[in-house]
Image (cartoon, grey):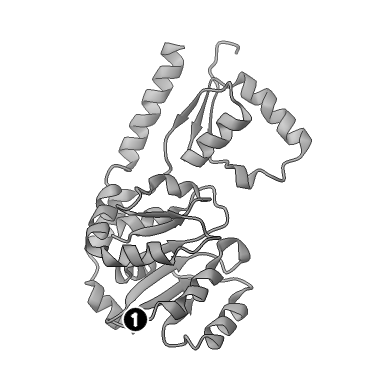
Amino acid sequence: FFQCKLLILTDAISRTETSNSFVRNFIRKIIAAKTNTFIACSKLTESYLLKEFPKSNVEKSFQTIDVESWFEAIGQLPTKNELRTKFKLQQDKFMLLSIGNFIPLKNLDKLIDIMPELSNCQLVLIGEGYLKPSFQEQIKQFQLEDRVQLLGHMNQEKLQQYYKAADVFMFPTDRDTFGYVVLEALICGLPVLCSKYSGASSIIEEGRNGFVIDPEENFVPLLQQTLSQLADMSDCATNSMKKYTFQNRAEEYVEIFKSVCYDS
């Protein structure tokens, strides 16, 4: 037993671990002392582990999805204009998209707040939650009924159609260990404005496939910059995801396992 190697795969980040009890943290420190290697699923997780367990060995292998099947599915969909016609979306305005529960954690109200100053944009929010009546009141207050839509949960096939119909993906979450919707959006060619409190911010290449934002600060200038170079950033978004296949991640794991088992 004592010859076994212990590796722990984790997506924990500082913002999700603030309410841990003393006992839980104490037990974690004991486990960490016996751990040969942590595999961090994002840069935020890496930072958290090195702060909490500074003597630990930490390797990175970012989370991913079935990239190849998503590329295949998106390639078979109708064109952006055809999809916008199908969903009765405006052809002459940029489409901003966000997906998540309608709860305070996701900060989706901030997206509605900025719409009055973005007359060249329309916003689609997909999700459900108890803040929906509040969002509806916001939309009414700002007279945005013609430019903001609230849609309920939908299956993956329809979701992919909305991704392809969109131009930019917004992810202003207050905290998220990762955020697979960011990966889905990038595959579909959407530059992403991603919260710095999301593990998926590790995938963002600043100014190329999106921007990492502070959801508490004014991110409209970064959105406008994205819209001004949308074609180039859209290409970068798609290309940036080609390396995040299951095959590549499996190979990363193999190399990590080899280094732990044979080099230590």
Whether residue 10 is visible to the viewer of this picture, yes or no, is no
Q: Position of residue 12 (x, y in %)?
A: 57, 41
Name which residue lies at 41% across and 69% down: 97
Q: Position of residue 151 (x, y in %)?
A: 47, 76
Name which residue lies at 45% across and 15% down: 261
Name which residue lies at 52% across and 61% down: 217
Quadrant of image for the N terminus: top right
Name which residue lies at 36% across and 30% down: 252
Of residues 216 and 90, the one drawn nearer to the viewer in this rendering: 216
| Vertical position of residue 185 compared to residue 80: above or below | above
Query: Residue 77 occupies which quadrant of the picture?
Result: bottom left
Amino acid under label 1?
A: Phe
- Residue picked out by circle 1: 87
- Total residue callouts: 1
Q: Secondary structure at mark 1?
A: loop
Whether residue 186 is visible to the viewer of this picture, yes or no, is yes
221 horizontally vs 23: left or right: left
219 horizontally vs 207: left or right: right
Q: Position of residue 203 (x, y in %)?
A: 38, 46
> How many C-alpha atoms fall within 10 Å of the one at disc 1: few (<14), some, or many (≥20)?
few
Q: Position of residue 248 (x, y in %)?
A: 31, 36
